[in-house]
Image (cartoon, coloured by chain):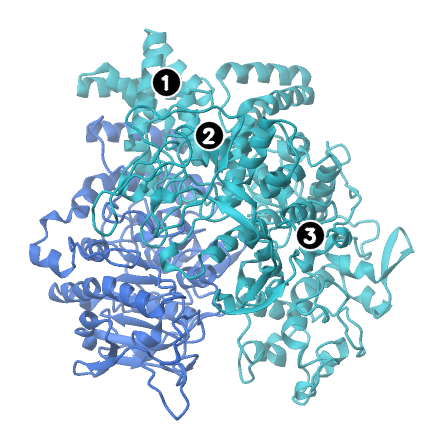
Amino acid sequence: MLILDSPPPLPSPDLPKLSAVHQFSIRLCLFVALFGLLIAPSGSFARDEAKAVSPADRTFFENKIRPVLVKHCYECHSADSEEVGGKLLLDTRDGLRTGGESGSAVVAGKPAASRIIQALRFDGIEMPPEKPLPEAVVNDFVEWVQRGAPDPRSPVATKTSAPPTAKNATGDTPTPPLWSLQSRTNPPAPEVRIPDWPRDPLDRFVLARIEEAGLVPTHDADARTLIRRLHFDLLGMPPSMEAVEEFVAAHQRDGAKAVETLVDTLLARPQFGERWGRHWLDVARYGESNGNDGLGRNPTFPHAWRYRDYVIDAFNNDVPYDRFLSEQIAGDLLPSESPAERDRHLIATGFLAMASKPAKAMNTSFEMDVVADQIDVIGTGIMGISVACARCHDHKFDPIPTRDYYALAGIFTSTQTMWGISANEKLTAPTTDLHVLEAAPKVLPPDGFVETVLVLESNTGIPKAIPKPKWPVGTPLAIGVRDLAKPADCKINIKGDAQKLGEAVPRGFVTACEAAESTRLKIDPKQSGRLQLAEWLTQPDHPLTARVMVNRIWLHLFGQGIVGTPDDFGVYGERPTHPELLDHLANRFINDGWSIKRLIRSIVLSRAYLLSSDAADAVIKADPENLLVARHNRRRLDAESLRDSMLTVSGQLNLEPADGSIIRHRDILVNLAGNLHQPSNHRSVYLCYLRSSLPPELAAFDVPDFTTVTGQRDVSTIPGQALHLFNNPFVIDQATHFAHSITNDAADNEIRIRLAFRRALNRDPMQNELDQATELVESTAAELKSDEVAWISLCQALLITNEFRYVD
Amino acid sequence: MNYSRRAMLQSTSCGFGGLALNVLCGEQVASASPDGLETRASTLAARAKRVIFLCMSGGPAHMDTFDYKPQTGKKKHPGSVFRFRQHGDSGLGISELLPETAKHADELCVINGMHADTGIHAQSFLQLHTGDRLRKRPSLGSWISYGLGTENQNLPGFISLNTSKSSIYSSAFLPSIYNGTPIGVNGENMSLATISNVGSNHLSLSAKRRQLDFVQTMNRDHLKQRPTDEKLESVIQSMELGFRMQSVAPDLLDISKETKATLDNYRVGQQKESTGTCKVSDFGRQCLLARRFAEAGVRFIEVSHGSWDQHKNHRRDLKANCEVTDAPIAALLGDLKQRGLLDDTLVIWGGEFGRPGLTPEDGKDETGHNSNGFTFWMAGGGVKRGHVHGKTDHTGARAVEGKVHFRDLHATILHLMGLPPNDLKYWHAGREHRLTGPEGGKVVHGLFA
């Protein structure tokens, strides 16, 4: 471990570096060859200022200060203002420093003495007048003044000083660019000082940042750690002891080649799709029931599981991500070559039919609420931008005007969403048609089931009449969407009120991220426009789609994203820790045909991924949140992986995919049905993900509620989890099976204990562990007069240790 | 336990208590029990020992509950659309929707000048709980348990009933032992909500203890090889607390031994169907559990009810929410008072923001969000009785006098608990953090009796 006290001098330390965050200036810039690559701003930028402002300060100003000035101050304090407030101009460097009627706005280095800070703090003067800015923004200004108020802008006033960028609400006033809406750059892999460290170009981006901070990456993880990490990351399951030993030997013999072989084997296993499909199902807010509709009613989605299987298959078959999205958004409009493919396309559109709907009875805008959910899953799920707020008003933070919302809404109001009969509960949702599948087999319900299990009239308690099923019993059906016969543009709902309509907005996309190619995408007036929406989202120059997805992939492999807020790439989301790396990966992703497997393969074979999760104190102190990726993040097993691991070790895991779902024939209200869950030995992804009634084997470990997009699950530590581990029937069951397997396989206590350690922890026990385990078994057997229970106690103990539940 | 707290503190880079705890508790740290829940004396004179936070999620309409806005002048303007009456000796104005709560008017300290930073639910809700709108930060209950420990070593210091996202009761970077323990999740059937998996009979308690000792020995060895990982250390503590909870929690959750009169007061078992999202019986049970936890020494108890986000059908849905919550809250106040607990229990009522008022007779029945002016109330725990603090303008749109921001509310609560609001800090990721954020909060002394 080597920690440098201070970074050694770089060849030309003064030169600004090319990075994504400077991108807007690049548009205005000349490239001048001078000791390498120097970016000298031209146009309205003064060259001397550009040199005087360091790259870090410029980044800070452009990301934190300028956008706020433009948004909140320029209206009254710029050359474009109709009347300049207090004769103070904030759109130029000199204006800010000279100040207005009340004197200089900024005293470099002295926040307390700076009028602008006083105003932002509402201390004497109150600016902006309508509302104080968020604390974080004020703190940014304080930091900026402390830095000496470095300002790369033009010293003199010019009209419209903000750079020309994405259009805002009205389409004519420029707003500053949001980093994520700028086109991707094609950054060259940076030079590094340890040339033999990188294995993949992505490593150079990682290492360069580490070196910049005067640190060095920690050592590589050992082979045992690595195979366990790869198994969980790629399959969500632990390796067997035999697989570990085989890999350790191969790694000793072949080094990196052995890792490659292992990775290729794992990527080809069907458990890969179950693991990564589950990640996507979180994003897709996949649930097998509606969730509380606001009246306490929670109807099942008996056909939703088909979408789950579709997603798992798509990941296993490495369906290109652009294709994957198109199928989910517009599968019904895509050509298909066989009935089976047609089924697949229809099932994919279930993505848009998963809304957790508020009760129709409560609501005058039920249809628009369904549309809102669809817009949200496209916005936050695919683009990492919340469009939802624009339903009622121009987005306050992100450049999403209300018109954009209704341009998108028109696409979905021209679409019929099909969820079925909602337990025949009209107060919850009106009955809709469903997709009827052609190639899928007919499955009859088992005895004792009817297609619609009828419950009581919620108000009167009288049993309900059985509605006549529209299709013969057992017909394969799917939830999803299809175009309405007469597509139409949507009228603006004034302040989100479906009763108060404004003008109709032509169907379209999000104007703030219009890429060069968008103009050729014309929505066919005879269609909803979903096909073009899919095309627009997946065009290679869309600024968000690829970035958001590669960040999701990175997050699942490293435990944290390059952008810390995977579902929010907006103004108030976090900024990327490695903007160039993000673009580099997004470019590769697209150039590699949007192949998710290939991207995962590249990342897990990189040097960065190989790092140990241990590091010297100094590294941890210097970067406690591991933003530099100088080490790996130790991670707790998520709910599904923990359950699957227990099943693996107990020998009970059934690796066959589950056939459908336990509710596939049950169109009922979950809230009245009581507990619908049944024990299962299939992988966790096949459990029944009922909203507001989560599988009890998973519920303790931060499973989301599946009503909205969840890019990253919480990781909490609460005593309820300990109680689950001590007392949950599933855990006790697995401990029992585990105990029976080792007592059957060996007679000798020491051998049994060794077996237990090898199966649960993939290692032999140390002598002291052997002693303690023997002591536990013997005294428990003596107290409870049962050898069986004593072995169960030991086996349960191993399944609940931190060593079992965490991955290094 | 065969490890000392001191050894544990030395075993990690900054010890689970961190810097602030050392500052706060001085020499107590080295001698106290090993898991951080021991009772710690507050550094200031405490007026309250525990908090019950009645969290009305969704943004309750302040002008139709506690902030009366009659029509003034000739032109109709937004204001209250339900009738108000003055109650008690104090003459506090309370809406007709809350007749039972109104009987306790003389206990309430109404704060009418609340304001927050944003009208976005999730962000404001997070800010109300943690002081931060965006990032995962320790919740108010976690800060208080961190500062004061709990009075009952067998229970968590912070319990959240009918909660929502875990970020609301998270201890974030504070040691996980201060994380809230949820009972029931909003949307699930609250009549059955309990602490899951609180018992099993496959092993005797002594065999379970022996088993856990083995697990913890392995966990500590595992931690020894990964000495800088505070999360792993937190899990060890959390396992111990979980173990102890098995002995007391089942009885505490069992309300069947309460008298019929008490159950009736809280409306537990009342079958009345309600149009709201929660049955009165369920909310009553939550309030009753809150009293039982308070009595048992839990430091911070949150009782949630929602949603008060009635955009459409304002009148009908607000009425439904009030019907469900009114009697149980009144019962809680009465019960605490009768048992002599109200003096040192701070009861707080409020949500993430308020709502703009409706203009009477214009036919509109729809409201939105208003973070510029809304209402909280407090009772017990050393606050003034029958008092109104601050005000909003004549339309209720913005706080104009006695303004109280969430960070001021937080500062005030910490102060009442005897904790120094702006000095209760924790070192994390290279800097000191506090509930009241970089700006700090102002203690609202005007609320104190």
* Residue type marked 2: Pro
Closer to us: B121 or A713: B121
Question: Which residue is disc 2 drawn over?
Answer: A476
Q: Quadrant of residue A638?
A: top left
Q: Tag 3, which secondary structure?
A: loop
Q: Which mark is residue A523?
A: 3
**Marked residue nearer the N-terminal end (2 or 1):** 2
Q: CA distance from mark 3 to mark 1?
A: 70 Å
Note whether A734 is above or below B186 in the view shown. Answer: above
Farthest residue, direction bottom: B74
> In the rendered structure, the residue with mark 3 lies on which chain?
A
Find disc 1 in the rendering and name its residue.
Answer: A770
Q: From the viewer's perspective, is the residue at label 2 or at label 1 nearer? A: 2
Q: CA distance from mark 2 to mark 1?
A: 55 Å
Is residue A64 shown above or below A231?
below
Viewer-closest of B161 and B80: B80
- The amino acid type, in three-letter code, at marker 3 is Ile
Residue at mark 2: chain = A
* Distance from the alpha carbon under mark 3 to that under mark 2: 32 Å
For disc 2, the neighbor class at 10 Å (few under 14, some 14 to 19, many from 20) is: many
